[in-house]
Image (tube, rainbow, N blue to C red):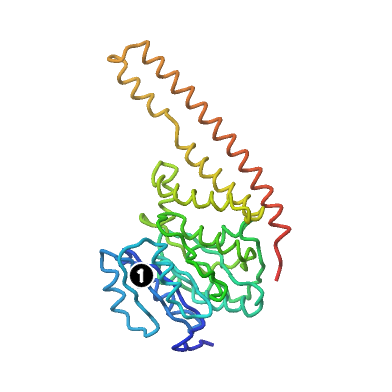
């Protein structure tokens, strides 16, 4: 049965940062309005969108929606503001271009009611290129089982900025998400929270739809291997390095942070081949000369071989760390 929202302290606060999503934000809000649990407020922070995002928001009529308009400060700034303005017992995170199935909040509430010893929960999520209203149907009529996992060992696969729900009373006083970081800010926020609360509740059921489009964070991450966003990526990696060097970081956190550094190196190295230059060397041979062209070609092949060796060694090291993490994850997992 649907629960009605109280004005002063709703059960859930839905925290949504919004930037340049005029084409998607209305559908995102509809997925919230359709929740089987209706005791919520929606806090949307418009982060200085230059398009019609603010006008689309202002056209909404649901009284549970609160719109906060601020100058552009980045996604982490908007997400921190949404959290700070939230009044609910639980904060449910949702990106402004994603959507929930109707039982998303219901399943989260069931977890917290059955397991009060845990302070956060994340459902599985499904990556899709597009979301249609017809897709927004309940995930399953069957009851899902819950289990707890160590976030550093396997939680990164389930926590996203649209699948995670946190008990507001468990949040630290300082902002959770790092300012000035253009990529992976949510992951850093989850890792900071995991330092305080390493065990995370989850389920095999997927109730969040994660849209991948040209300007989405995931699409940007997939472009890293082609050399894009290296500066933005480095911002996040430097923060993670500080966490790694912190003596208070547990062994599981150090394993996780080392695996992140290695896989990012592997992605960068995988795209570092110079073999595309060979065709240019062949074209310029009449001008460059036969001897110099042959020398350049040899150097390119040698560098290419060196890059392949680096990539294989790094991947081998990563696989060993990941195997160790998988073994520890199985030991830490708790069936609820």
**Up-down: is 7 above or below 103?**
below
Percent position of residue 6, x then y: 47, 89
- Badge 1 local density, few (<14 within 10 Å), some, or many (20+)? many
Judge from the rendering whether residue 187 lies leftward or rightward of residue 274; answer left or right: right
* Residue position marked by numbered label 1 in the rendering: 25
The front one of 74 and 271 is 74
Judge from the rendering whether residue 216 lies leftward or rightward of residue 152; answer left or right: left
SS under mark 1 = helix
**Up-down: is 44 above or below 236?**
below
Residue shown at 64% from the left, 47% from the top: 322
For residue 96, what is the image quadrant? bottom left
Residue that sits furthest to the right in the current view? 331
Q: Quadrant of the N terminus?
A: bottom right
The front one of 289 and 65 is 65
Judge from the rendering whether residue 294 lies leftward or rightward of residue 125; answer left or right: left
For residue 300, what is the image quadrant? top left
Percent position of residue 217, x then y: 42, 56
Q: Quadrant of the C terminus?
A: bottom right
Residue shown at 51% from the left, 26% from the top: 305
Residue shown at 66% from the left, 74% from the top: 117
């Amino acid at each position: 049965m649907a629960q009605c929202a109280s004005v002063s302290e709703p059960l859930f606060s839905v925290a949504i940062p919004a930037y340049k999503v005029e084409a998607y934000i209305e559908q995102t809000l509809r997925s919230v309005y359709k929740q089987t649990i209706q005791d919520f407020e929606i806090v949307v922070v418009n982060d200085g969108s230059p398009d019609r995002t603010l006008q689309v928001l202002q056209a909404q009529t649901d009284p549970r929606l609160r719109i906060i308009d601020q100058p552009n400060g980045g996604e982490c700034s908007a997400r921190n503001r949404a959290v700070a303005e939230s009044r609910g017992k639980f904060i449910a995170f949702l990106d402004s271009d994603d959507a929930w199935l109707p039982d998303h909040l219901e399943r989260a509430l069931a977890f917290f009611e059955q397991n009060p010893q845990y302070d956060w929960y994340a459902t599985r999520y499904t990556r899709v290129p597009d979301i249609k209203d017809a897709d927004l149907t309940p995930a399953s009529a069957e009851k899902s089982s819950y289990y707890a996992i160590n976030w550093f060992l396997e939680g990164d696969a389930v926590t996203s900025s649209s699948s995670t729900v946190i008990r507001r009373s468990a949040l630290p006083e300082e902002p959770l998400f790092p300012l000035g970081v253009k990529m992976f800010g949510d992951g850093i926020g989850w890792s900071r929270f995991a330092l305080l609360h390493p065990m995370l509740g989850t389920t095999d059921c997927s109730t969040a739809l994660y849209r991948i489009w040209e300007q989405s964070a995931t699409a940007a991450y997939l472009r890293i291997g082609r050399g894009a966003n290296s500066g933005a990526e480095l911002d996040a990696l430097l923060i993670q390095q500080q966490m790694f060097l912190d003596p208070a970081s547990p062994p599981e956190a150090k394993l996780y942070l080392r695996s992140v550094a290695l896989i990012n190196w592997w992605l960068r190295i995988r795209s570092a081949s110079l073999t595309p230059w060979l065709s240019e060397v062949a074209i310029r041979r009449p001008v460059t000369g036969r001897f110099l062209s042959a020398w350049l070609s040899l150097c390119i092949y040698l560098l290419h071989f060196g890059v392949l060796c680096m990539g294989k060694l790094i991947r081998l090291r990563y696989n060993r760390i990941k195997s160790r993490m998988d073994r520890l994850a199985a030991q830490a997992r708790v069936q609820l």
